Amino acid sequence: MPSKVPVLCLDGPSGSGKGTVGQICAQRLGWQYLDSGAIYRSLAFSLRQAGIDAADINSAAQQAAQLQVACLPGPDGSAKIMVNGVDTGQDLRTEEIGELASKLASEPRIRDAVLAAQRRARRPPGLVADGRDMGTTVFPDATLKIFLTAAPQVRAERRYKQLKLKGFDVNLAHLFEVIQDRDARDAQRSASPLVPADDAVTLDTSDLEINEVVSRVLDLLQPRLVHERAGRTSITSASSGGDSRDR
Ligand code: DC
């Protein structure tokens, strides 16, 4: 029986900390990292580059199916996103691209077109996947599903600091508004909306430092990994005629 590659899903709204927490967890575990938002952002970016109107869903879905996105570890610990072999640098990180990504992501045909690429990221020894529907749709059999939240003002301030650090000219009040709109669209769409999976653990990160969130997530993950491995061991020994009790 093929062994199941473990997956840690981190879903949540913008600024909840899932990207930063996800990258640190992936580094500590030595696992692959999937920034699924970067796929939708890459699509928005590539449509713009190719001069394709995002409202032309046929062309957008075709482009989505051909898109090659790789999330590689960047020099400062942040993920480096390569689209069709080209490093996108900071081009994907603007709120304008985030907004267009969110609009494209509400279209079921676009979501279907990127589903297989997301699942292909599940490679040994494990995967940390961040997004909006990792636990509900993409990896329903994940080892652990975490839904990260934080108060809207805290999330806006985090995004503000991140964007400032990356050199963007941003206004906190405006950012607060656009993030609220984007999260409302992501949560209210009919295709894979931003909602916690039934079996997700919700963590409010408003008053937590990043390292505290990472520790809590990894503490929740460890017993699940032990349990999953024990389950596999017992299945393997049962099928080879050995003792089927967990050890
Ligand atoms: O995580 P992010 O801000 O980079 O995501 C940008 C947009 O992409 C987000 O507003 C909605 C969409 N998205 C999605 O619909 N499903 C995902 N799994 C990830 C992102």
Image (cartoon, rainbow, N blue to C red):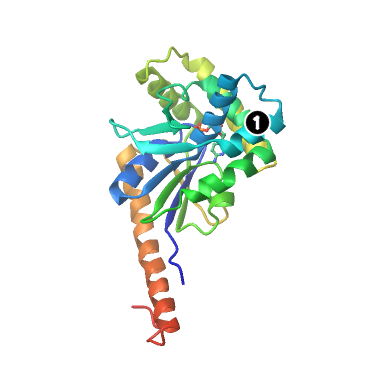
Left or right? Give the position of 164 relative to 44.
left
From the top left corner, tell me how far across and down residue 140 is, in percent.
55, 56
Asked if the beta carbon under badge 1 is closer than 8 A to the nearest atom of ligand 1, the reply is: no
From the top left corner, tell me how far across and down residue 14 is, in percent.
50, 32
User: Could you tell me which residue is drawn at 52 percent across and 46 percent down?
Assistant: 118
Provide the secondary structure element on which disc 1 rests.
helix
Q: Quadrant of ligand 1?
A: top right
Viewport quadrant of the C terminus? bottom left
Dividing the picture into quadrants, the one containing residue 75 is: top left
Front residue of this view, candidates 22 and 177: 22
Would you name the residue on which mark 1 appears? 60
Front residue of this view, candidates 115 and 183: 115
Left or right? Give the position of 143 relative to 73.
right
Task: Mark yes or no: residue 198 visible.
Answer: yes
Number of marks drawn: 1
User: Could you tell me which residue is drawn at 28 percent across and 30 percent down?
Assistant: 76
From the top left corner, tell me how far across and down residue 25 is, in percent.
34, 46
From the top left corner, tell me how far across and down residue 11 is, in percent.
50, 43
Task: Classify 10 Å Cα crowding around label 1: few (below 14), some (14-19), many (20 and above).
Answer: many
Dividing the picture into quadrants, the one containing residue 106 is: top right
User: Could you tell me which residue is drawn at 62 percent across and 42 percent down?
Assistant: 113
Front residue of this view, candidates 96 and 156: 96
Dot 1 amino acid type: Ala
Task: Mark yes or no: residue 195 visible.
Answer: no
Left or right? Give the position of 10 relative to 137.
left
Front residue of this view, candidates 164 and 78: 78
